[in-house]
Amino acid sequence: MILLLAMALTVPTFNKEVAPILFARCAGCHRPDNIAPMSLLDYKSARPWAKGIKASVAARKMPPWFADPRFGHFSNDARLSDAELKTIAAWVDGGAPEGDANDLPPAPKFVEGWALGKPDAVIDIGEDHQIAPGDDVYEKFVVPTNFAEGRWVRAAEIKPGNRQVVHHVHVHVLAAQDNPAAKPAAPKRKMATLSEYLLKEGKLTRIMKDAPVWNDGCADKVPELPFLTGAQEGGLAAFLPGRAPDQFPEGTAKWVPAGAKLEFQIHYAQVKGKPQTDRTSVGFHFLNGPPRQALRRMDLRNFFMQIPAGEANHEVRRCYDFESDRYLISFTPHMHYRGKDAKYELVRPNGQSETLLAVPHYDFNWQLVYRLQKPMFVEKGSRLMVTVHYDNSRNNKANPDPQATVRWGDKTEEEMMTSWIEYLDASPSAQLQPSEAARAR
Ligand code: HEC
């Protein structure tokens, strides 16, 4: 009897110990009308899932987080602490009691539709776009911002107009003359342009089957193929499965010049059943005045990879040699169904090397951004090595066709090898130009 009483006393309750964890760590997705299958905001909805909750957190399937904990420290690390895991396990093992209503903290408030709160400006794709049932489609929409003056954007949240069909969205600022941040890094030597190797099939693009093949972008000698070295200037914001809205680090912002146009690239994935309508938008949060630093993004890609049919562990690499001092801010690896793992390593000019991020089990359904806890200084002459593997074998359950030789393409059934890397320029000359700052006022 005494023993039973003591046990009852130590079992955590939903209202007291468990709800605060679920509210803080799960409800962002597990609430009505969001991406997760059930709400964890109240006892009635959560209770039937108690066993599943314990199992999924113990296996670290939930919350989704894929970085190997041995490398790097990330500000958006979603993993539960050991104490939180213990509390959940003890609650479930103790019968998942509700507890005293007075213990229940208020549920978190979510602004309807906008995770970051009401934006300062909202720009949509300009039409109610119809998507017919059928295959994957990529659509581009170019719309004016009508900004009378340039703006510094500290956060950009993309809101899919129709979550059933919008798989992912990229928003780019179309290069305007007074936008230094949008100028693509000019290739140093004259070489073939990428478009010479690309083929448009309807609205989708892929590389030609007979384009040169080059998997090891970190080899001693890399052929002069477009974007196999250097970096491309990246986009403004993205919506990807599982990715939080783009909020740029304190003191940094991205510049959108006066009169700029935005390009939305939207992937509408395999629409089934009846035709659908979408009107996706992006909400901007502005900074009043210039930031300390302009945030930039470089995109590293290997367009020339080729994955042999059936190959279970095909390696593709891409390297970037720093031509100036920079601070690294975040990494986003991107592959499709055959993506297996990804690793980011840095070799400094003195030969010292370190692993910045390792994603041992890449999952196409969860395209997370990994934000470094602190900006990481990288000196000129360092080399960033991105190594990924693909599983094109039958054992990969997500593999749509193990018999296909796979190359680069927009379509999810084809592949990509892309990394987005957010950074700040560290050399004083590259920091915010006064003219740039003046324009922003
Ligand atoms: C980033 C969004 C996100 C967060 C954060 C998140 N979940 Fe999930 N969760 C999902 C989605 C989406 C699914 C359904 C797809 C899947 O299982 O991958 C899911 C599935 C689940 C399932 C399995 C349901 C089933 O069908 O078996 C459980 C249990 C679960 N989540 C519990 C949790 C708990 C507990 C937390 C917090 C500690 C959490 N989740 C945090 C998005 C999230």
Image (tube, rainbow, N blue to C red):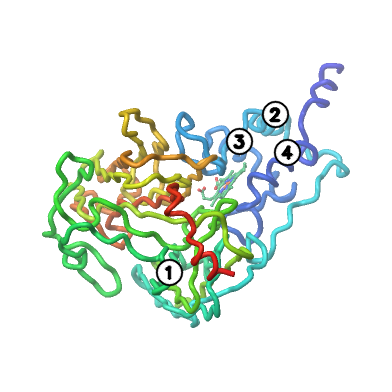
State the residue position of label 4: 18
Q: Quick check: can you spot residue 130?
A: yes
For the image, the number of numbered tags is 4
Nearest to the eye among marks 3 and 4: give it: 3
Quarter of the N terminus within the rendering: top right
Residue at disc 2, secondary structure: helix
In the picture, measured across the screen, residue 207 lies left or right of residue 127, that is left
Nearest to the eye among marks 1 and 3: give it: 1
Q: Earlier in the sequence, mark 2 or mark 1?
A: 2
State the residue position of label 3: 80
Where's residue 137, x and y in %? 35, 70
State the residue position of label 2: 90
Residue at disc 4, secondary structure: helix
The amino acid on which the numbered mark 4 sits, given as a three-letter code, is: Val
The amino acid on which the numbered mark 1 sits, given as a three-letter code, is: Asn
Q: 198 or 188, which is in the foreground?
A: 188
Q: Earlier in the sequence, mark 3 or mark 4?
A: 4
**Image marks 1 and 4: residues in contact by CB distance under 8 Å:** no
Q: Earlier in the sequence, mark 1 or mark 4?
A: 4
Determine if the C-beta at disc 3 is less than 8 A from ligand 1. yes
State the residue position of label 1: 179
Q: Earlier in the sequence, mark 2 or mark 4?
A: 4
